[in-house]
Each structure stands twice: as structure tokens, then as C-alpha cells.
């Protein structure tokens, strides 16, 4: 069974003759206690293309020390990583390989680097003896994996590498401000921020294994922040787009309102962000981290929406099949999320009913309904993520990163192209909203309002994607459209809640419990929906003013 440890640390390097300062007296540090020396032997695994290293992910099998076993390190934030641990075994354990599937796909994980480290550990304590931080002074010796099996110091004709590294890690609920103070003391003694984000990144670079930039060390400050700003795939896409005259894919490096941006720059930047979110959130979903399912679902919807909005930039012959699979994945992710949201809505509604009107075991009835739908939902989602259809989608997303399907309009100036796409989506929203307002009350109007809600979401996403090119007008346009989406979302949530309340009332009636309370909540939901319908015309008049659309035009 794997367990997880959150690491908050800073990495440094120093020459062999650099003396570390006495850290007693730094902030709340009252004493520095020697904690012994360890000999660590680690074998790092990756794909032959170094897919994990390119994303700052490391998987190793380590012996020696206090935590021998398999360690998977996943980036969380600059200077913060989650280390997922599993017991020692001969091959990478499946509970860890599953967490790198979105990056490694179905490629074999093989040894790439071996590190032997002599580690001297010191613990910083406060006046009460509470451990605050741990300082590890490492003498590192690295080889390519091919030479690590034997006794020599080189493998495949490549020499090993040696360096001295210092890691400062917070313990318990420590304050990162202490890391800042320690960093200043180390700098004064001649200790430098590490030039690579991890030992693996440095080992790959210094043993000559950073092929095609896949494992080049990420330039990092003491907090581990990457300075490159883009991955191998983005760099390749940028070069390819330039060579075709279709505009460069700037990735995350593109700044808002940057002059000279092409439509390809802007759209690919947004699309890349969503693809990266899907890839990076999948391990979090597998680990059942809070809000991870929702965020991954949002990313799938945003990406699919971008494919449909920016058809002049991205070739629909390529993106349409991916969009179909994204729709499927969003639906699978939504099963448990929708149940959770609906249950919370009904629980909150029940909490607002006076005791005199709570007739029968209504809380228990709702709980039974919810638990029956929850049963198996988690296992089903994991089965989806482990399945061949999801793997095929992941391969398609990686292929999109490597070979973005740009059309001729991708090379045109961004403002005119992206504004046209946003306004096209707006016209679709306008048609659906006007049709919904004219529809007769009841099921027909409910369905029409639901269609308008989806159109509002698509228009909002298109405007958000256009913001780097159109600036503040796009931001305001997205904000106004979001108000329409939220109002219509409230209405649709009420439609779904009423269907569930009707189901609960029927179940309660059959069990002889009576359905009065559920009928009461049904009436309240019906009133809420009617209120949203009454509010829509006035909101739409404000949102649909011509001047808002005129502000988008370059």
C-alpha cells in the first residue's frame, strides 16, 4: 500500500571546500542536532524518451537510509512535491506506475540513472526541542544506468558525475519563512541555489543523457521554480509552426496583449494549458485528491470547447475525433461529481426545513439514495482511467502537443481571428437564448434553457482563450457571459433536483413513509426555477448590448 509525504524543501549546491554555517540562532532555531550519516543507493526509472523527467517527475528504487523503497515524486508547486512511497520490490509497483500513466502512456519504464549518495543529516530544533527542519548534506555520485549495473564508473562510454548538494526540508507544520532565513545564511557562506530542480535532472545532464532537450535540467532557484516556461512538445510545436509560416506556439510563455501574436499563438496557448491540466490532474484523480475530478472535467470541457470555437485555427478533421473522446471522458468524470453536488444541494435544502415539516426519515432516505449511487462509482472511474479507450485519448492529446493541427488562419494576426470566433459563438448563444425565452413553459423551455446554458459556457471559454489577444474587453465579455451561464446553471440544477425529489418521494411513498417533505422541496425548487426564468430577460438585455460586442472588434 502506497503512502504519501508532502515535501517542502529548498535545494542548494556548494564546492567541496565550502563550509556550511552554524544555523543555530537563525529564526526560531535554538539547536542543531547531528542525526547521523546514511549511504543511499537509488536507481531512477523513466521511459526511453525521458517523459517523466521532462515534467519534473521522478520514480526511483532506493535502498539504504530510513525510507528504503520505491518513491514517486510529483510536483505540486514551486519547491513542493508529493512523495508517494511503496515497499521495495524488484519491479516498479503498479500503484506507482498507474500514477505516471498519463505521461508514460504504455511505454516501458526502464532504469536510466543510478545515484549513490553519502548523506549527512542535521535536525534544526526550537527551544522546546521540536524539530523544525532537516538539513541534508549530500555527496552525490551518478552514472548512466547501463554502467550502474557493473562496478565501473562509466556506462555506454559516458563518465559518471560527482557533486555536492544541500537540501533543507521543513518538518511538520513548519513555516516557509524559516527556509528563506536559512537560504540567506547559506548564501552568505557561499552556498548557491541548485542549478537543477532535482538530482535526476542534474545527473541526466551531466552524464550526457539530455537527448533532444527531454531531460535538460530545469533551471531552478532555491524554491525549485522552473525557468524554462515550456516543455519539449511546446518547443517542437513552436519550431514546426514557424517553419510552416503558421505562427509559433508560444505555450505558457505568451504574455497577455503581446504584440505580433498570431491566432495560432493564442489558441495553442489555451489548448496546451488544458491538455497539460488533463495530463497533470490524472494522478490527482487516481489519488482521490479534493476537487481533482472537477478540475479535470473542466479542463476536458474547455479543450473540447476550444476545438469547436476555433475551427479556423485548428483542423476539425483532427480535433473532432478527440472532442468526441473528451466528451466521453467528461461524462465519466461527472458521474460521481454530479452525485456529490446534487446530494449536497438536497442536504442543504433539507437543513432549511423546520422540524415540524420534516415528516418521516427524510435524511436517511436521501443518504440511502446517495450511497447506492456512490457504490462502485470510484472503482468505475479507476477502471476508465486504466482502460484502453482512455489510453488512446491520452496518446491523441500527446500527439496534439507534438503536432498541433494548424490551419492557414493560424498565421494571421490574433485579434481579428479570435474576435471573430468569440462573436460567432455569441451569435449562437443569442439564437438559443431568444428561442428559450419564446418557448412555452415546461419541459420544452427547460430543454431550451439548458441548450442556452451550454452555448453560454462555450462563449465564455472562447472569450477566456481570446484574452491574451483582446485584453480587457475579452475579460469583461467572459465575465458577463459567465453571469448568464450561472443563472441558467441554477435553473438546470433545479430541473435535475426536481427529478430526483420526485424519485425520492415515490420511494418514500412505497415504503409507507410519506413524501410530504420531498414534495415541499420540489415546490421550492420549482419556485427557484421560475425566479431564474423571470430574471433572464433583464440579464440578457444587459449582456447583449451591442457596445460589448463592438469592444471586441480590433
Image (cartoon, rainbow, N blue to C red):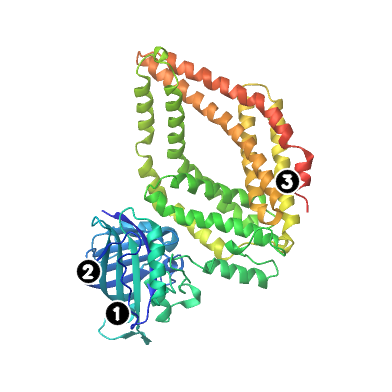
Name which of mark 3 and mark 1 comes first in the sequence. 1
Residue at image coords 63%, 31%: 449
Q: Of 297 and 202, which appears nearest the observer?
A: 202
Q: Residue at x 46, y 24 (%)?
A: 349
Residue 198 occupies which quadrant of the picture? bottom left
- Residue 304 in view in this figure: yes
Examine the rendered structure and indicate whether residue 176 appears above or below residue 149: above
Q: Sequence-wise, which precedes: disc 2 or disc 1?
A: 2
- The CA span between labels 2 and 1 is 31 Å
Q: Where is residue 339 in the image (x, y as percent from the top left)?
A: 44, 34
Q: Residue 105 in the image: x percent, y percent?
A: 43, 61
Q: Position of residue 454 (x, y in %)?
A: 61, 39
397 relative to 183 in the view: left or right: right
Q: In this view, does 415 lie above or below 234?
A: above
Q: Mark 2 points at which residue?
A: 34
Precedes in sequence: disc 3 or disc 2: 2
Of 252 and 333, the residue lying toward us:
252
Q: How far apart are marks 3 and 1 (CA)?
A: 59 Å
User: What label sits on residue 401 in the rendered view?
Assistant: none
> Alpha-carbon distance for marks 3 and 2?
67 Å
Q: Is mark 3 on a helix, strand or loop?
A: helix
Residue 148 tag number: 1
Mark 1: few/some/many CA within 10 Å (<14, 14-19, 20+): many
Q: Which residue is drawn at 43% across and 35% down?
A: 340
Question: Which residue carries the number 3 mark?
Answer: 424
Q: In this view, does 486 lie above or below 108?
A: above
* Residue 254 image offset from top left, x and y in percent: 63, 62
Quadrant for the C terminus, please.
bottom right
Amino acid at each position: 500500500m502506497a503512502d504519501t509525504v508532502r515535501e517542502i524543501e529548498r535545494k542548494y549546491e556548494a564546492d567541496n571546500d565550502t563550509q556550511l554555517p552554524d544555523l543555530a540562532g537563525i529564526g526560531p532555531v535554538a539547536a542543531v542536532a547531528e542525526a547521523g550519516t546514511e549511504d543511499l543507493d537509488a536507481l531512477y526509472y523513466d521511459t526511453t524518451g525521458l517523459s517523466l523527467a521532462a515534467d519534473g517527475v521522478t520514480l526511483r528504487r532506493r535502498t539504504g537510509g530510513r525510507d528504503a523503497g520505491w518513491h514517486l515524486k510529483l510536483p505540486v508547486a514551486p519547491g513542493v512535491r508529493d512523495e508517494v512511497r511503496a515497499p521495495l520490490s524488484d519491479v516498479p509497483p503498479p500503484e506507482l506506475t498507474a500514477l505516471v500513466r498519463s505521461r508514460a502512456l504504455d511505454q516501458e519504464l526502464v532504469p536510466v540513472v543510478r545515484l549513490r549518495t553519502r548523506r549527512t543529516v542535521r535536525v534544526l530544533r526550537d527551544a522546546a526541542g521540536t524539530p523544525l527542519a532537516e538539513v541534508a548534506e549530500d555527496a552525490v555520485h551518478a552514472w548512466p544506468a547501463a554502467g550502474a549495473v557493473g562496478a565501473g564508473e562509466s556506462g555506454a562510454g559516458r563518465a559518471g558525475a560527482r557533486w555536492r548538494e544541500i537540501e533543507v526540508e521543513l518538518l511538520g507544520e513548519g513555516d516557509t519563512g524559516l527556509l528563506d532565513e536559512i537560504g540567506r545564511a547559506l548564501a552568505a557562506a557561499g552556498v548557491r541555489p541548485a542549478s537543477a530542480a532535482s538530482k535526476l535532472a542534474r545527473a541526466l545532464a551531466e552524464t550526457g543523457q539530455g537527448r533532444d532537450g527531454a531531460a535538460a535540467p530545469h533551471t531552478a532557484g532555491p524554491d525549485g521554480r522552473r525557468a524554462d516556461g515550456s516543455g519539449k512538445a511546446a518547443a517542437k510545436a513552436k519550431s514546426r509552426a514557424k517553419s510552416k509560416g503558421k505562427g509559433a506556439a508560444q505555450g505558457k510563455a505568451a504574455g497577455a496583449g503581446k504584440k505580433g501574436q498570431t491566432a495560432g499563438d493564442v489558441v495553442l496557448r489555451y489548448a496546451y494549458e488544458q491538455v497539460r491540466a488533463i495530463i497533470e490532474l490524472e494522478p490527482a484523480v487516481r489519488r482521490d485528491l479534493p476537487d481533482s475530478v472537477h478540475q479535470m472535467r473542466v479542463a476536458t470541457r474547455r479543450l473540447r470547447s476550444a476545438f469547436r470555437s476555433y475551427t479556423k485555427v485548428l483542423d476539425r478533421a483532427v480535433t473532432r475525433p478527440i472532442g468526441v473522446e473528451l466528451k466521453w471522458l467528461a461524462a465519466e468524470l461527472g458521474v460521481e461529481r454530479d452525485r456529490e453536488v446534487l446530494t449536497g444541494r438536497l442536504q442543504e435544502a433539507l437543513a432549511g426545513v423546520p422540524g415540524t415539516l420534516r415528516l418521516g426519515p427524510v435524511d436517511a432516505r436521501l443518504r440511502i439514495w446517495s450511497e447506492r449511487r456512490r457504490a462502485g462509482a470510484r472503482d468505475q472511474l479507476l477502471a476508465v482511467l486504466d482502460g484502453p479507450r482512455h489510453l488512446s485519448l491520452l496518446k491523441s492529446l500527446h500527439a496534439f502537443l507534438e503536432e498541433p493541427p494548424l490551419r492557414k488562419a493560424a498565421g494571421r494576426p490574433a485579434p481579428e481571428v479570435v474576435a471573430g470566433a468569440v462573436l460567432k459563438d455569441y451569435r449562437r448563444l443569442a439564437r438559443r437564448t431568444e428561442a428559450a425565452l419564446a418557448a412555452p413553459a415546461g419541459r420544452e423551455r427547460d430543454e431550451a434553457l439548458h441548450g442556452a446554458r451550454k452555448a453560454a459556457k462555450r462563449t465564455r471559454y472562447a472569450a477566456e482563450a481570446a484574452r491574451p489577444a483582446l485584453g480587457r474587453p475579452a475579460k469583461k465579455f467572459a465575465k458577463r457571459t459567465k453571469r448568464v451561464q450561472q443563472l441558467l446553471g441554477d435553473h438546470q440544477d433545479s430541473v435535475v433536483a426536481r427529478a430526483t425529489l420526485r424519485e425520492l418521494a415515490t420511494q418514500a411513498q412505497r415504503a409507507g413513509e410519506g413524501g410530504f417533505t420531498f414534495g415541499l422541496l420540489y415546490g421550492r425548487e420549482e419556485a427557484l426555477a421560475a425566479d431564474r426564468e423571470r430574471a433572464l430577460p433583464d440579464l440578457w438585455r444587459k449582456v447583449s448590448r451591442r457596445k460589448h460586442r463592438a469592444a471586441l472588434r480590433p
